[in-house]
Every structure is written in C-alpha cells, then in structure tokens.
Amino acid sequence: MISIAAAGNTSDARLIKACRAGDQRAWATLVDRYKRLIYSIPFRYHFSPEDCADVFQAVCLELFSELDEIRSPDALRSWLMTVTSRKCQEWIERYSLPPQSESAEAVEQVTEPGRNIAEILHEAARDQDIREAIDQLQPRCQELIRLLFFSQPPQPYDAIAQRLGLATGSIGFIRGRCLQRLKNLLEERGL
C-alpha cells in the first residue's frame, strides 16, 4: 500500500502497480496528480464546466480499464494528454459539429482561431510541469505561491501573513526565495 504522506514523491510506476493490486488510495493519488492536466485540455477547447467534467470522467474510465495494458508508466502523462485530446475531438464531433463537418479545420474552428491541437497540448504540458514543480517546494512555499498567484480574489499580504503565521513585512522576502526555488526547479525541467 502507498503511504498517503509519501504519495507526492511516489513515482507513476509505483502508483500504477499499487492500483493494479487494488489499492484505492493509490488510485485516488494518481487521479489527483493528473486531474488538473486532464481538465486543462477540454478547458482550452472552451468546453463548458459540465463537458470538462464529462471528458475527465471518460479519461479516468479509460485509464482504469487500460491500467493493465500500460507498458511504460513513465509515459503516463503523455498517454493521458493523448487520450484527453482524443476524447475532446470525439466530443466535438459528437456534440458540437454537424455530422458532415469532421475535418481538421472544423475542429480547429471550435477552438480559438489560429490555435491547433499541438499548441493546446504543449500549453497543458507546460502548466502540468509548473504544477509539479510547485508540488516539489516546501509546504510553506507551496501555500504562499498558491495564495499569491492562484487564489481568487487575490489575497492581500496582511491576510497571507496572518494565515501563514508570518510578519507582513517578511512576505516579499519569502516570496522571492520561493520563486527562486521554483525557477530552479523549472530550469531543471528545461522550462
């Protein structure tokens, strides 16, 4: 069984092995690790939140049914991106486009003009790299970055300082150190 505390550091190969053995916590960890990546692809196609959730569910069902067939766990992320993109295209063909309009141009017209599937997948992969790098930071840096850059509405420094138990004047200094660590992690990934 995978320890929940160590799940963030657990490789995809170990999680898949545990999932194959019926470990439900490993399955929850695996889905949690990639849910933002999976959701981000239909989101970039401008799907409604309900359609994004339906695509997410379809991808998770396919992952679950194909777990025993995955030969290269290190390629899981690419596999998920490919499956999600394919599910999005199927969704577009099934629900958004007239039956006679199944060309690549028609699929691209449903997304933003001038954007193609490769660009969408590249952005999704880059965003996943950033999320994974943030997850490698110390917990205080993770929370600080999420509060500063991802919370809606944006949090003022004094509210962040109170939540983290820090002096308001130290937020800028700690932010700088955390962002430098994040930058180093991203550079290690080639970003």
Image (cartoon, grey):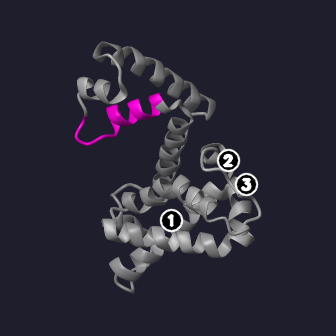
What residue is disc 1 on? 85
Picture quadrant of residue 146:
top left
Mark 1 or 3, closer to the camera: 3
What residue is disc 2 on? 10
Picture quadrant of residue 171:
top left
Q: Residues within 10 Å of mark 1 (few under 14, many from 20)?
A: many
Contact (Cβ within 8 Å) of mark 2 with mark 3: yes
Label 3 SS: helix
Q: Nearer the viewer, residue 82 or 61?
A: 61
- Spot the residue most to the bottom: 99
Q: Nearer the viewer, residue 129 or 140?
A: 140
Between discs 1 and 3, the one toward the N terminus: 3
Kindly report the secondary structure that dominates the magenta region of the rendered protein. Answer: helix
**Label 1, label 2: how far apart the Cα atoms are:** 26 Å
Q: Which residues are magenta?
A: 140-154
Residue at (47, 48) in percent of width and height? 123
What residue is disc 3 on? 14
Can you see residue 5?
Answer: yes
Residue at (67, 47) in percent of width and height? 10
Q: Nearer the viewer, residue 185 or 174?
A: 174
Residue at (47, 71) in percent of width and height? 57
Label 1 SS: helix
